Amino acid sequence: MRQAVLVSPRNIEFKNVEAPKAENLKAHEVLINVKRIGICGSEIHSYQGLHPATFYPVVQGHEYSAVVVAIGKDVTVCKPGDNITARPQLVCGECGPCKRGQYNVCEHLRVEAFQADGVAQDYFVTTDDRVVVLPAGMSLDYGAMIEPSAVGAHATNRTDVKNKNVVVSGAGAIGNLVAQFCKARGAKKVLITDVSDLRLAKARECGIEYTANVLNKSLKDAAKEVFGDEGYQVGFEVAGVESSVRSLMESIEKGSDIVIVAVFARDPALSMFYLGEHELRLIGTMMYRHEDYLTAVDYVSRGIVNLEPLISNRFAFEQYDEAYKYIDENKATTMKVIIDFEKKSDIQ
């Protein structure tokens, strides 16, 4: 089978390796044929050599959809022929967080595509506890975008957004999804900000009414226009830059919550005095749990969360490197790039 390995930053090698065999499956394992992979922002950091927790060489790919080929003898959640996606988390099940159900922050967490090999290959073996069957009629493209949707589902459960005014700083794919989930969870008004007019236009296309380009207007002024004297009570930092989290801290209502969603390439310098004096809460959020995947599938299948405007381009498997170069060259206009295993490549 084909396999794409990120050997080192900006260096992808294509290999022909032996495919896993159905007869070797353990009782709770599932053999799948990978069909789509969404390229994640964190994987872009890995490609660029900027991700702090990527172990090279590694097979990338953790946002994906696939078709079940075979199942182990004790698997009941899916059957051959089902379209599925699956969580990429490998957890110990024995540490404190795992025992209290917070396996997304397992003390020994490994994530496929970063600390363990991912699905950038024709066939892959996963375990049934991580599998989610896609509903009939859901596209394989959308199936590959359930993972980032689950990030939005989990992040918006880290604090209560119902009947509150919300600012989402950063309108890339994850920020867009966070904003959509805020609306779905009953937020009063949602303002999303960015430095790209295209991303803000995509947000409006996805139903986010209030947008602001912070190159042209400060967050404080934009929030005043949208929320008036009510202000806002929840902020989501999804840009991953110091100026973004500082702006949220300086403009949010005192005693409010800011959820840090982005992975920062460089740690921000923040005023802990200001944080304490305003009694703000900075809340971390890490990936998702199984229920977040189920919520994401439900919301996407019912049209509550709109994924179609987020798909920027697609590339064949053999064009993995070109996909990253495309993202590098089109940062301001790229939302989600998909590797389509069924697409024919013009590479000979």
Image (cartoon, helix red, strand yellow):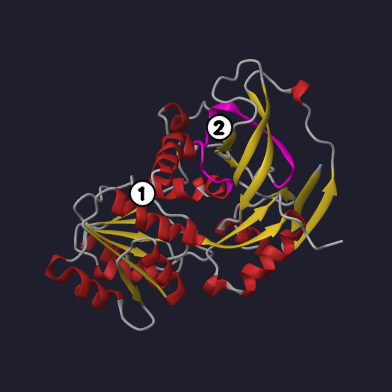
| Residue picked out by circle 1 | 304
Q: Nearer the viewer, residue 44 or 318?
A: 318
For this view, does 212 lie left or right of residue 117? left
Q: Residue furthest front?
A: 137
Find out whether residue 22 is within the magenta segment: no
* Local crowd size for mark 2, using a 10 Å CA cut-off: few (<14), some (14–19), many (≥20): some
Work out whether residue 114 can be spotted. no
Image quarter (top left, top right, bottom left or bottom right) of the C terminus:
bottom right
Position in image of residue 2 (x %, y %): 80, 46
Q: Residue furthest bottom?
A: 216
Position in image of residue 94 (x %, y %): 52, 26
| Residue picked out by circle 2 | 131
Regarding mark 1 in the picture, which secondary structure is present there? loop
Position in image of residue 244 (x %, y %): 38, 70
The mark nearer the N terminus, 2 or 1, is 2
Regarding mark 2 in the picture, which secondary structure is present there? strand
Residue 73, quarter of the rendered image:
top right
Position in image of residue 157 (x %, y %): 33, 45
Q: Which residues are magenta?
A: 120-140
Name the amino acid type tagged 1. Ile
Residue 196, quarter of the rendered image:
bottom left
Q: Nearer the viewer, residue 54 or 222?
A: 222
Find out whether residue 126 is within the magenta segment: yes
Whether residue 248 is situated above or below residue 27 in the rendered picture: below
Q: Residue at x 49, y 61 (%)?
A: 310
